[in-house]
Image: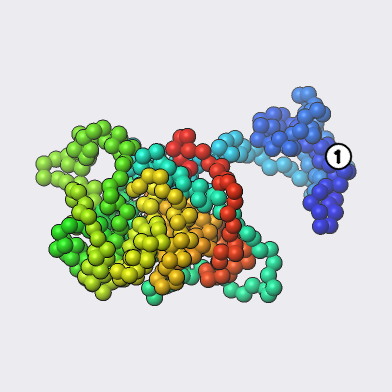
Amino acid sequence: MTRPGSDKAHPEQGASRRKFFKFLAASPLAALAYSAWPSRLLEPVAGEMLPSMPSTEPLPCVDCGAPVLPLGLDGGPLATSLPPGLDPTRVVLPARRQELPPQQAQEEQLMGSLIESPDDATNVWDFERVTHENNLAQHWDYLHMGVDDYETRVANREGYQRLMVRPRRLSTEPATGFSTATELFGEQFNSPLFLCPVAALQAYHTQGEAGAGRAAQRAGVLQVQSHQSSQTYEEIAEARGAPHWFQIYTNPDWNRNQRVINRVVAAGCQTLVWTIDLLGGSNRELSRRSLVGEGRDSELCQQCHQHQEGYVRAMNVDPGGPAGERPPYTWDWVNRLKNASDMNLVVKGIVTAEEAELAIEHGADGIYVSNHGGRAVNSLWSTIDALPEVVAAVRGRVPVMIDSGVRRGGDVFKALALGADAVGIGRPYVWGLGGFGEDGVDKVIDVIMDEFRMVMRQTRTTSIDQITSRFVMEAKNPIMTRRNELGFGL
Ligand SMILES: Cc1cc2nc3c(=O)[nH]c(=O)nc-3n(C[C@H](O)[C@H](O)[C@H](O)COP(=O)(O)O)c2cc1C
């Protein structure tokens, strides 16, 4: 019996539980199962464990009182005929032999596990492990890498882990309605989550950007296509059945930029994203090592990408992307890009207040806080740390987007609380795609949105605009539970 309002068991119940576990322990099958029992359950019976002879007497279940028979070695009930005096309709036959729960659950929780279907995923890192397993090492390295010593990549996660949630248990009025709907430039989305521009998605799954796009469309989330995608804007838009946003890497030859812009406008694109955080270059050591010095000219790459005369399997279908040294771009380029079409212009890669201010002054319609997922500049602070000063500088004039290191619905919540309007994931959806194609992307979005909705319920917020800075606070130290020794879990 349990006292009302308490989850502590009565002493009699404790004794009865111990007896019950002792009884179960006497079953030969239990020897197999001991290792799966939580230690808190084993401790009370450890001292009282009976030797090998199993009992055939039933004992009452501690919860419902029904007599339970012990299991035989074949997994069926040990007693073939019921002891006299037992009502057969009330006897519980224990479940037949079942597969034991995984012994390495704790390790898998922290490192991800090799799941066989998207539905088996517990969190986004489960997809990371599968994509690692499924993909060519060089492609994996390109996806995984950070620059230099990964300081910015690690900082991105630490930033979120240093922020604590301030929950709200009860509210003054009963909650009515619940929505994660979000609007950007007059466009409606089901969620503030979006898919970041990531290059060459066919390196991870033949469905490529089109597969990711179909998943995004199903979930009602924004997709931003990379300039270096493996499929064209038109192919992706057709697969989705709707236009999406396009990210551009500018070329010193303005005509090439204009041609790209004209092409995506003709296909229905309404928002252009200019990425500026790679303009100074990036030290991508892992990629250099994994391509063994010859880069894409290596035999390994050529065998796949150019394995017969006249055949080129593109890494991307870049319709005129960056080539060679980047010229010293000026803020005037924001005006030029803005004036090149009627599209909205978002500047991606802003991490300081002064650059947010300058971008808006020069015509940006949106600010996108990003450090390229730690793939551009080393020793940066996390984007979630940069967000408050950018939001303060923007003063609500334009939407603020953010990405880098977002892995949990709780991270989405924290970013919104600190003033972001939309929150992007890069690697996580590519892990989903690399593991299971678009079904994997569906599930990655679902997992993060389920987590996000839970944090909304825990804070009793029922719409995106209710998520404010009162729901987060900074802790003294990051709570880093995931270790990255094997390269997973960042
Ligand atoms: C493999 C890979 C390729 C990327 N390619 C591009 C790109 O072509 N254009 C771009 O603006 N950002 C690119 N990014 C950066 C993402 O848009 C985004 O900023 C970053 O992935 C977010 O961090 P996260 O991976 O930690 O979620 C790329 C990121 C990855 C992982």
Q: Position of residue 233 (x, y in %)?
A: 25, 62
Report the front residue among 150 and 456: 150
Decide: few, some or many residues near mark 1? Use Cα within 10 Å; few <14, some 14-19, many ≥20. some
Residue 376 visible in the current orientation: yes
> Is 198 positioned to the left or the right of 101 in the image?
left
Looking at this view, is 454 or 131 the one in front?
454
* Residue appearing at x 82%, y 29% in the figure: 48
Give the percent coordinates (x, y) of residue 426.
39, 53
Which colour style is shown?
rainbow
Against 55, residue 101 (above or below) is below
Q: Name the residue: 32% across, 54% down.
A: 277
For badge 1, the amino acid type reads Ala
Residue at 79%, 32% (x, y): give it.
45
* Image location of residue 184, percent across then percent down: 40, 71
The picture places residue 126, in percent across and down from the top left corner, at 48, 45
Q: Quadrant of residue 31?
A: top right
The reply, left or right, for residue 170 in relation to residue 262 is right
The residue at which mark 1 appears reads as 15
Please determine whether, in this image, residue 272 is positioned above or below residue 483: below
From this view, report whether residue 361 is shown above or below residue 142.
Answer: below
Q: In this orientation, does residue 263 appear?
A: no
The residue located at (81%, 57%) in the rendering is: 5
**Left or right: 45, with 243 as reference point:** right
